[in-house]
Image (cartoon, rainbow, N blue to C red):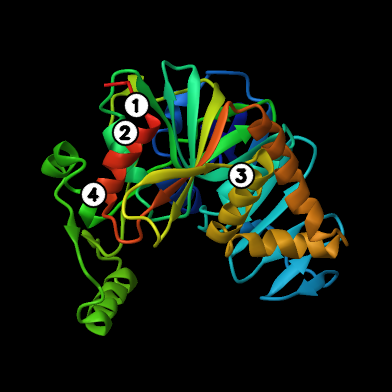
Amino acid sequence: MKFLYQIHNVGIYLDDDDDSAWGKLIQTNIKIQFDGFEIYKDAQKIEYSLIIKNIDELNKREDAIVVPECSYFYPEGTMRSEYLNVAYRIDDKNVFMWTNDNTWYAQYLLEILFQKQGITFVHGASVSVDNTEGKLLLAFGGIGKTCFIASAMNKERVSLLGDDLILVSENGELYSYPRPFCLYEYHKELFPQFFTTHKVNFVHIEEKMYFKRIIRRIKMMLHIKDNNVYSFFPVSPIRLFPKKKMQINPVKLIDIHVLRRNQKYDEVAISNIITPEQAANFAIDVILHEWDVGLKIILNRHAQTFKNIDEYIKCRYEILYKAFCKAKNINCVEIPENLSATNVSKALNTIILRGLD
């Protein structure tokens, strides 16, 4: 068993002691998701495990319940998806994941291990102030979270908890999850030092779309390295910011800001204070929207055990509601529909990090 990464008290392991071609591929692919998570190694004791195994070891059987999209549910609790090339099984403190090369599904299984501890993912962005006070932004993608983080990290007292995914505990704490940033071409001005030393060629696939897709496909088939970026470029935050700016330990959740695009507003403004219940509902709706594709295999398994979907949602809601009740402030921030990400960042820094200059 080969240790790969530690995320707080969860260890990710690879069941491959022979350095096989499959094992090397998994390590390459999973690094895209967890590059930079080395900061957690030995930070605390590992209590839970995600163990990645080769799906070729799973013999095809004929005793499964067949569910949509070529998925199979076996009596011992293993859920397998031919479409996703992934399978998993849960026990008390472990989740076993079988795959050929699909490692992006790991984060959905990490959610299972964290829920066992009263912790769940939300979608948004988060920073801490003085390594003690957590500020959580809840939002859909594309609203300007990364721009906010880039500007906020220039402040001496601010450190990073995460962009896109953050962990919230029922005790009212935020746990960092510094997954790689998804950088688009418009982010170049935010991270000039990185893009000066790393030449990245963004290709607009919408222009001559079919020709460019054919070229990209041919390169993949011939195993030709393609240095072009057709959508976004994943970069670990430790490649963008000093390690001291990474928040490793949990911090108390103090402020919650629900971000929304609103056509009625001409400038960024706080519209009203909302309840923990409203904030929890918003957070769940957003994460389910952002994770809709990956949730299918989990909901398939849920259905085969005759559980109501409410059970899946209720667990997350209770965690968030308990956490949000402990926050000091919860408000709704209205953002004009067409305001640029850069201007959103400036406004959010003024509202959320006032007095830290």
> In the image, what residue occupies the spot 49% across and 53% down?
22
The answer to whether the residue labelled 1 contacts the one labelled 2, judged by CB atoms less than 8 Å apart, is yes
Residue tagged 4: 187
**Apparent side of residue 4 relative to residue 62 in the rendered image (left or right):** left
Q: Position of residue 196 (x, y in %)?
A: 11, 42
Q: Of the two numbered discs 3 and 4 on the same chain, state the one appearing first in sequence.
A: 4
Q: Position of residue 354 (x, y in %)?
A: 34, 26
* Quadrant placement of the C terminus: top left
Q: Name above or below for residue 41 compared with residue 228.
A: above
Question: How far apart are the alpha carbons under marks 3 and 1?
Answer: 22 Å
Question: How far apart are the alpha carbons under marks 4 and 2?
Answer: 20 Å
The disc label shown at residue 279, or none: 3
Q: Position of residue 164 (x, y in %)?
A: 45, 46
Question: How far apart are the alpha carbons under marks 4 and 1?
Answer: 24 Å
Tell me the quarter of the picture where residue 179 sits: top left
Disc 3 versus disc 4: nearer the observer: 3
Three-letter code, disc 4: His
Callout 4 secondary element: helix
Callout 1 secondary element: loop
Tell me the quarter of the picture where residue 60 sits: bottom right
> In the image, what residue occupies the spot 71% across and 45% down?
317
Residue tagged 1: 354
